[in-house]
Amino acid sequence: MSDEELLTIRPIDGGAALVGEIDAHTVGLLTQVFDDPGDLVLDLSGVEFVDSSGLRVLIELHQNRSQAGGTLVLRAPSPAVRRLLEVSGVADYLTVDDGTTS
Amino acid sequence: MPSVPSPLVRRFDQSSDFSDVAAARRFVREALADVDPAISADLQLAVSELMTNAIEHAASPHVTVEVTIDVGEVVLTVTSHGSGPLAPVTTWEPAPPEASAGRGLAIVRSVATNVTVDHVDDTLRISVHRAR
């Protein structure tokens, strides 16, 4: 199975939608795509799996943008994302938009 | 008394690009097909963290993943070889929110009912117990 099948990144207004599985193998795709420190929205409704490797990159993206005066918004996190934020204790550190109105 | 359940076992000869991490998750998902999906999801997360650690820290590419479904609990065991003295098991405490790394094992502990670690010679065996 190729990386592209495990994780796809689709452009949306203001950012990207991530669909698939984020782990140590696929996370390199994210760091390659989001090197611009401007405002970024990541739609996470299609994330079927994510572990601490993915969380590490989300935290780094958040920090890079905060330092540059921008924001990272995690939109409509899937159950897998919610569970990871819960068990890792960083839910309040990152900016989450439940996406119910979008 | 029920008989002792036999574990489902898979051995991975992993490559350094972490592609076996997803394969380990699939194995756990298939092994736990008849178990509460929330428990299965948490143990897929645990095996992902433990496989990633094994690839990063263990000297040998051989990692064994075992799943045992017992009456009262599910046990996930990941065995790796050639790890340095306690190197992969020093960071069980949750990392602060602003830390970007070092929270894999804290996540494993947080989804587990209990975790046991056996580190004998060069073999590191971590068992994640989860009540069901």
Image (spheres, coloured by chain):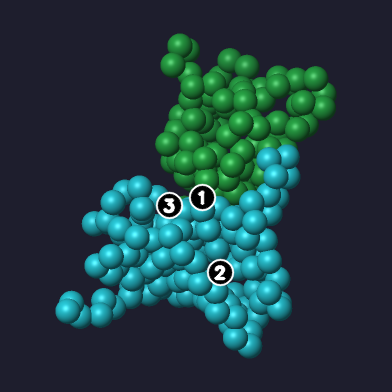
Chain colours: A green, B cyan
Where is residue B1, by image quadrant? bottom left
Left or right placement of residue B80 versus residue A65 in this view: left
> Is A28 or B100 nearer to us in this picture?
B100
Secondary structure beneath label 3: helix
Q: Residue furthest left?
A: B1
CA gap, disc 1 and disc 2: 16 Å
Which mark is drawn over residue A2? Answer: 1
Of marks 1 and 2, the one in the foreground: 2
Disc 1 versus disc 3: distance between alpha carbons?
A: 24 Å
Which one is nearer the viewer's eye here, B14 or B9?
A: B9
Q: Secondary structure at mark 2?
A: loop
> Pointer 2: what residue?
B14
Q: Is residue B85 left or right of residue B64?
A: right
- Which amino acid type is shown beneath numbered disc 2? Gln
Gap in Å between the C-alphas at discs 3 and 2?
Answer: 22 Å
Answer few, some or many: residues within 10 Å of disc 1's Cα (few below 14, many 20 plus, some between 14 and 19).
few
Q: Is residue B19 visible?
A: no
The label on residue B54 is none
Question: Which of disc 2 and disc 3 is earlier in sequence?
Answer: 2
Disc 1 + disc 3, Cβ < 8 Å: no
Which label was assigned to residue B42?
3
